Amino acid sequence: MEGLELEYLDWIKNLINPDRLPYDCLIEHLYNINYVTVKDDDNNRAIDGTDLRYTFCYEKGYSSSDSYFIVNDIFANKPCSVLEMMTALARKMDENIMWNGYRRVHIWFFDMLANMNIDDMTDNNYNSGYIDIAVNAMMYYNIEYNGKGGLFVSPYNDVDMRELSIWYQMQQYIADKE
């Protein structure tokens, strides 16, 4: 990884970890895991994740033609990463659903890490095998009934979070917070 791809990863880190807490190993690990969709609706999360590359270009001031070149040349068929999917989802939660005038992308992102039981994977406590197991459990819906182990947890027992796509898990999570 070099040049613009490193700049892109740094841009993501600033969105999800603005205080620069010691999570570089975890963040980079999530960036290197391809996001796998199991439910059809989750394909939209992958699209949102790869669209984040265009958002980066736009926010950095690149023209549309330069953005197209950057995304198609630099990322040359690289599938959406788990990090991109989670970051894009946290941005959607913040900007489109829960906007209150303050940027909280990092809060939503760290809530997801906590729900997956990997929020303690700081650089000093980094365990790639544990992270891989947790990420696979999330992607393949090998999570608890209430969503624990996935991105979103519902404290109520009226819905099986394993049956919901990530988008609808998020909707349930938000409804439970209100």
Image (cartoon, helix red, strand yellow):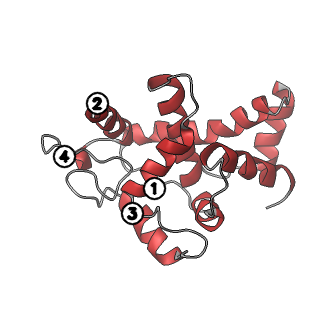
Between marks 1 and 2, how big is the CA–CA gap?
A: 19 Å
- Residue 53 is labelled as none
Count neighbours of disc 1 (C-alpha within 10 A) and say few if under 14, some if 14 to 19, many if 20 or more.
many
**Foreground label between 2 and 4:** 2
Count neighbours of disc 2 (C-alpha within 10 A) and say few if under 14, some if 14 to 19, many if 20 or more.
few
Does 149 appear above or below 53? below
Between marks 3 and 4, how big is the CA–CA gap?
A: 19 Å
The residue where tag 3 is placed is: 117
Disc 1 residue type (three-letter): Leu
Which numbered disc flags the more N-terminal residue, 1 or 2?
1
Q: Position of residue 127 (x, y in %)?
A: 52, 77
Q: Position of residue 89 (x, y in %)?
A: 50, 39
Quadrant of image for the C terminus = top left
Disc 3 residue type (three-letter): Asn
The residue where tag 4 is placed is: 160
Between marks 2 and 4, how big is the CA–CA gap?
A: 15 Å
- The residue positioned 71% from the left and 34% from the top of the image is 54
Does 31 appear above or below 100? below
Disc 4 residue type (three-letter): Asp
The residue where tag 1 is placed is: 113
- The residue positioned 77% from the left and 42% from the top of the image is 72
Question: Badges 2 and 3: C-beta atoms under 8 Å apart?
Answer: no
Disc 2 residue type (three-letter): Ala
